Image (cartoon, rainbow, N blue to C red):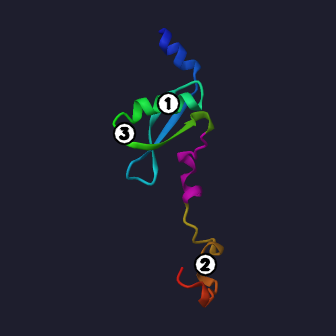
């Protein structure tokens, strides 16, 4: 293992999200190793926004991200047809509420 590989292994991994000039959403652009959030944002600026395409950068420590498992797909994303309380079809909407 080289010295640079060893130092990367000791630094936390950060997931980087960039919001483009004309976009409203941040999108995942990659990952990098950094000692802290400030360093992650500065490194992300240098690596992922070289052509002035970004207006905002998010850096999230990878270990802080919670994700569902593909094996949970069925119960997690199952249609809510059996849960009638999630469908507003039986609520009376007052006229003064207008179009919803």
**Residue located at (44% from left, 35% from top):** 30
Q: Nearer the viewer, residue 87 or 31?
A: 31
Residue 73, magenta (yes or no)? yes
In front: label 3 or label 2:
3
Check the image and report above or below for 98 versus 85: below
Residue 27 in percent (x, y) is at 44, 46
Dots 1, 3 in contact, CB < 8 A: no
Residue assigned mark 2? 88
Residue 44 in percent (x, y) is at 46, 32
Residue assigned mark 1? 42
Dots 3, 2 in contact, CB < 8 A: no
Residue 96, magenta (yes or no)? no
**Residue located at (59% from left, 82% from top):** 89
Residue 3 in percent (x, y) is at 50, 9
Whichever of labels 2 and 1 marks the residue nearer the N terminus, that label is 1
Q: Marks 2 and 1, how far apart in space?
A: 46 Å
Q: Which stretch is magenta? A: 65-77
Q: Which corner quadrant of the image does residue 55 belong to?
A: top left
Dots 2, 1 in contact, CB < 8 A: no
Residue assigned mark 3? 52
**Residue located at (58% from left, 47% from top):** 68
């Amino acid at each position: 293992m080289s010295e640079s590989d060893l130092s990367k292994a000791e630094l936390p991994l950060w997931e980087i999200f960039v919001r483009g000039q004309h976009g409203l959403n941040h999108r995942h652009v990659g990952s990098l190793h950094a000692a802290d959030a400030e360093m992650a944002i500065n490194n992300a600026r240098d690596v992922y926004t070289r052509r002035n395409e970004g207006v905002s950068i998010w850096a999230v420590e990878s270990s802080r991200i919670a994700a569902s498992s593909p094996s949970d797909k069925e119960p997690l994303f199952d249609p809510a047809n059996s849960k009638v309380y999630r469908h507003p079809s039986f609520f009376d909407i007052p006229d003064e509420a207008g179009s919803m």
